[in-house]
Image: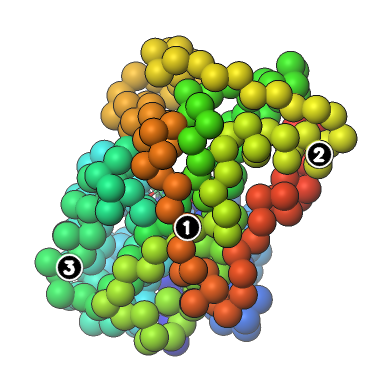
């Protein structure tokens, strides 16, 4: 079976691509930068260059002979790219699209409405689909590294609310199973980490991984917004982040599911393991 990975140079897409390569397959990747793809995967993938923002024949060429697509899109207008890819896929005879979505499709929080529109677009194309409705990523915690390194503290507006962050490798593992089997066609797989933790508990876990205490300080929504605008700029993304952090504080995002276990047969990776793997980023 031939698979095409869209978003292959990013956090999750690179892991899905690597898993396919490790299994002996030769996936195709649709990327903006061939150099970036070559640096990641060497000669083990077929590289198609193009930009989903600029529709061209490059996507059509990339879809030729493909059985399944891993589709990762981002931004408040992501449904445009989900629609373009899924309709082109249907037209090209692609059997199946696996979309990385979010658990927040179910709550309407944060980026949930963006991905809900994307899921609708894919349903409308008629192509078979699997939606990976993932909880927040453990790798989001890398955004805490500067204040932890400099001051030994994590500041957030999440209070003592909890969320079950998921390891990026678990998301990639579930996506790869969805892509390479027919077992989850037509399904939305809701996947989370194994345990909901507060940001204070995660700060303490990082502290144990680096052998130094890491404190937690609660800040207001207004302060969280101001801080986020500094690194991300004003716009729908920062609005979505503040909405997510508020929902965590109010206990609306503490869902834990057995999705990873059901799909992969093993327990999700614990936050303590992620912290140990990434300790160097916090030291
Ligand atoms: N973070 C969370 O907690 C969370 C939770 C649930 C769901 N999600 C969803 O997960 C997704 C983000 O995943 P990620 O962290 O793996 O993303 P990422 O690391 O930012 O990777 C984004 C990928 O998309 C590619 N890309 C961006 N614009 C493109 C375009 N116009 N044409 C072709 N390729 C393009 C990027 O290519 P370049 O290398 O060229 O930039 C990169 O490969 C989003 O849909 C987000 O809503 C996130």
Residue ID at (49%, 77%): 262
**To which quarter of the image does residue 269 belong?**
bottom right
Residue 28 screen position, x and y as percent: 47, 71
- In the image, residue 115 above or below residue 27: above
First of labels 3, 2 by sequence position: 3
Pick the front one: 181 or 159: 159
Q: Nearer the viewer, residue 165 or 25?
A: 165
238 lies left or right of 54? right
Residue under numbered circle 2: 208
Ranked by sequence position, the earlier of labels 1 and 3 is 3
Image quadrant containing the C terminus = top right
| Residue 163 visible at all | yes
Does ligand 1 reach within 8 Å of label 1's beta carbon?
A: no
> In the rendered view, does 272 fall on the left or right side of 210?
left
Would residue 118 appear left or right of 174 to someone viewing this image?
Answer: left
Tell me whether circle 1 and circle 3 mark residues in contact (CB < 8 Å).
no
Is the residue marked by circle 3 packed among few (<14), some (14-19), or many (20+) residues within 10 Å? some
Please identify the quarter of the rendering in which residue 22 is found. Answer: bottom right
| Residue in view at x 27 percent, y 53 percent | 106
Q: Gap in Å between the C-alphas at discs 3 and 2?
A: 45 Å
Q: To which residue does mark 3 refer?
A: 123
Where is residue 80? Give x, y as percent. Answer: 20, 50
| Residue that lies at the very extreme toward the right in this rendered image | 211
Q: Residue at the spot x=81%, y=41% of the render? A: 209
Find residue 242 and report its horizontal and vertical position in percent.
38, 27
- Quadrant where the image shows the N terminus: bottom left
Q: Which residue is mark 1?
A: 256
**Circle 1 or circle 3, nearest the eye:** 1
């Amino acid at each position: 079976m031939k698979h095409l990975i869209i978003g292959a140079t990013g956090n999750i897409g690179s892991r899905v691509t690597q898993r396919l390569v490790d299994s002996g397959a030769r996936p195709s990747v649709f990327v903006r930068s061939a150099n970036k793809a070559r640096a990641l995967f060497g000669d083990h993938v077929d590289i198609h260059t193009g930009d989903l923002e600029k529709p061209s024949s490059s996507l059509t060429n990339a879809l030729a002979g493909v059985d399944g697509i891993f589709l990762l899109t981002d931004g408040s207008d992501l449904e445009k790219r989900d629609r373009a890819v899924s309709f082109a896929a249907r037209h090209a005879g692609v059997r199946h699209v696996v979309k990385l979505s979010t658990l927040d499709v179910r709550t309407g929080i944060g980026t949930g409405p963006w991905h809900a529109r994307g899921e609708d677009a894919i349903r409308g194309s008629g192509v078979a689909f699997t939606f990976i409705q993932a909880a927040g990523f453990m790798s989001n915690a890398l955004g805490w590294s500067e204040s932890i390194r400099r001051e030994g503290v994590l500041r957030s507006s999440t209070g003592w609310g909890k969320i079950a962050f998921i390891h990026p490798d678990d998301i990639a593992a579930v996506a790869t199973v969805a892509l390479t089997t027919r077992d989850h066609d037509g399904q939305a797989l809701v996947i989370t980490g194994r345990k909901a933790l507060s940001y204070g508990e995660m700060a303490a876990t990082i502290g144990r991984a680096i052998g130094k205490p890491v404190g937690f300080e609660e800040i207001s929504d207004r302060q969280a917004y101001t801080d986020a605008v500094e690194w991300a700029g004003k716009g729908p993304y920062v609005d979505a982040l503040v909405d997510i952090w508020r929902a965590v504080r109010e206990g609306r995002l503490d869902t834990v599911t057995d999705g990873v276990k059901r799909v992969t047969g093993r327990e999700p990776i614990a936050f303590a393991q992620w912290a140990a793997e990434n300790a160097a980023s916090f030291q």
